[in-house]
Amino acid sequence: MVALTYHAPTTLDEAVSLLSNATLPAKVMSGGTDLIIQMQRMIDSERLIVDVKKIPELTTASLSAEGLTLGPALCCSKFTRRDDIKQRFPGLVEAAYLIGSTQVQGRASIGGNLCNASPAADTIPALIANNAICRIHGAGGERRIAVEKFVTGVGQNCLEEGELLASIEIPAPAVRTKDAYLRFIPRTEMDIAVAGAAVSVTLDEQGTCIAARVAIGAVAPTALLVPAAAEALVGSRLEDGALAKASAAVSEAASPITDRRGTADFRRHVVGVLTKRAAKIAAERAGEGE
């Protein structure tokens, strides 16, 4: 196993300083559930681990009229117990709840899930559907980038040397706006997605969709925002025809692989089915005014 130098800073600036001045390859530990497994495969190497779970602002979630500011190291078990967040962003909470077992939920975080950048990450499509923004902090200052641009490839993100994810900012949803996330897995639980779909819809008082965002996961090297699928929903009351067009749009946008968990054709089909179902759930929630 890799030799470690471990630090647990208590401020954001201290964490950035450690990363910026590191003489060893550095890793940020937001949850560690993926990182620890990855490091078991590393031998004859040294790493600096910067554990950010002792930085208060990185382990809290603040909900206001402007939206949600989420600390990237807040564990999923605490996040999913927040009824006020679930009321506004039920799909995102659903996605976070799907990360691992009860034990894993006590360590895993949405920020860690995002930075790990797995194509099958559950929370990334849900974040994209909710128009989430990453606030990145580094020695040179701060910058913001949309979640759909944060992940750049399999296991890769846009963080530069000396930078870390400081918060995830999600704007308050408009009136009669709700989201939903669904995934397909071979087992009943504790598995990674073969395909996933997140949908957010906004309805007017007559039940017509006036805005939407659709994102898919596990069917391309990165989670994808699919504007064509959203366009298929806008202007409709989510009738079968509109849902079929949205399904076709995500299937066309997908570029999945074939492996022992599913063929490419199967994944294209399933992600379309999930999109239709998630759109219906989101619309039902929006219509109920939850």
Image: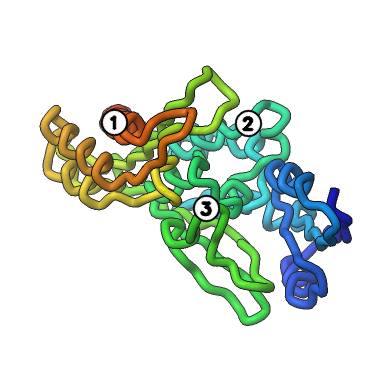
Position of residue 100 measured from the top left corner of the image (x, y, whole percent)? 63, 31
Tag on residue 91? none
Q: Which residue lies furthest to the bottom in this view?
A: 140
Q: Which of marks 2 and 3 is in front?
A: 3
**Label 2 amino acid?**
Gly
Does residue 243 appear anywhere in the picture? Answer: yes
**Label 1 amino acid?**
His
Position of residue 269 measured from the top left corner of the image (x, y, whole percent)? 29, 31
For label 2, count other residues whose C-alpha is less than 10 Å away and answer few (under 14), some (14-19) or many (20+). some
Q: What element carries label 2?
A: loop
Residue at the location (43% across, 30% down)?
183
**Tags 1 and 3 in contact by the CB under 8 Å rule?**
no
Dot placed on the residue nearer the N-terminal end, 1 or 3: 3
Q: What element carries label 1?
A: helix
**Tags 2 and 3 in contact by the CB under 8 Å rule?**
no
How far is disc 1 from disc 2 in space, using C-alphas?
A: 25 Å
Using the image, determine if residue 62 lies above or below residue 92.
below
Tag on residue 100? 2
